[in-house]
Amino acid sequence: MTLDLTAELAATRLLAVIRGTDTAAAVATGTALLAEGVRVVEVALTTPGALDAIEAIRAAAPAGSLVGAGTVLTPAAVADVAAAGAQFVVTPAVVDSIPEAVRRGLPVAAGALTPTEAYAAVRAGAAAVKLFPASVGGPAYLKALRDPFPDIPFVAVGGVGLAELPGYLAAGAIAVGVGGPLVGDAASGGDLDALRERARAYVAATS
């Protein structure tokens, strides 16, 4: 049975994006986020050893949480992340990986910025549209996009800090995706205690 990514994102309202420079630190980051109540995490393939990190985080993940792969650009990358145990795929744009992921039963949050891209992402089979970078237009732009596309589930990603988060949810995003403002430098060997504190704040803001 295919995972209903849209329903999961709408329920948790938070997608944590792990992008770092160290495999072990990325694993520690993912484990810490899940321990603090974040239920959906994505490991970007630009992280060294990302496939190993996905496998390790998935193995340690509590029941009810989801571990996916981000920056998945090609059909070959889809095969790799599927083998590593990724439960969903995230892309930065409308790319060739989308139909391949759909064919494999992996739900996709596909990156798009313009109305044409958002429509193309859904036509390609994306379960949700990752509005990226959301900070370019802010919540007002998201609201304008939703007027002609009220049935597209949008996830706002890119420059969403704690202060901006409520605005995107109020504008109709089913969830927000947060990298730097949440993860900080933890995935590159930074402070895990500070990460845990930020994670608790984000979980509280989306609960």
Image (cartoon, rainbow, N blue to C red):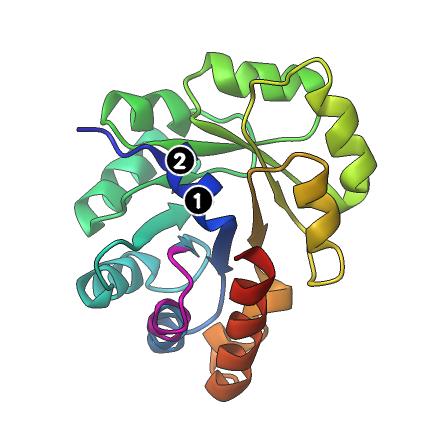
Corner quadrant of residue 3: top left
Q: Residue at x 23, y 64 (%)?
A: 62
Left or right: 13, with 58 as reference point: right
66 within the magenta span: no
Q: Which residue is denoted by mark 2 in the rendering?
A: 7
In this picture, is 22 found above or below 62? below
Mark 2 vs 1: CB contact within 8 A: yes
Corner quadrant of residue 52: bottom left
What residue range appears in magenta?
31-40
Secondary structure of the residue carrying tag 1 is helix
Left or right: 170, with 35 as reference point: right
Q: Position of residue 128 (x, y in %)?
A: 49, 29
Corner quadrant of residue 24: bottom left
Q: Which residue is denoted by mark 1 in the rendering?
A: 11
State the count of labels: 2
Q: Amino acid at mark 2?
A: Ala
Q: Residue at x 28, y 32 (%)?
A: 106
> Toward the viewer: 202 or 49?
202
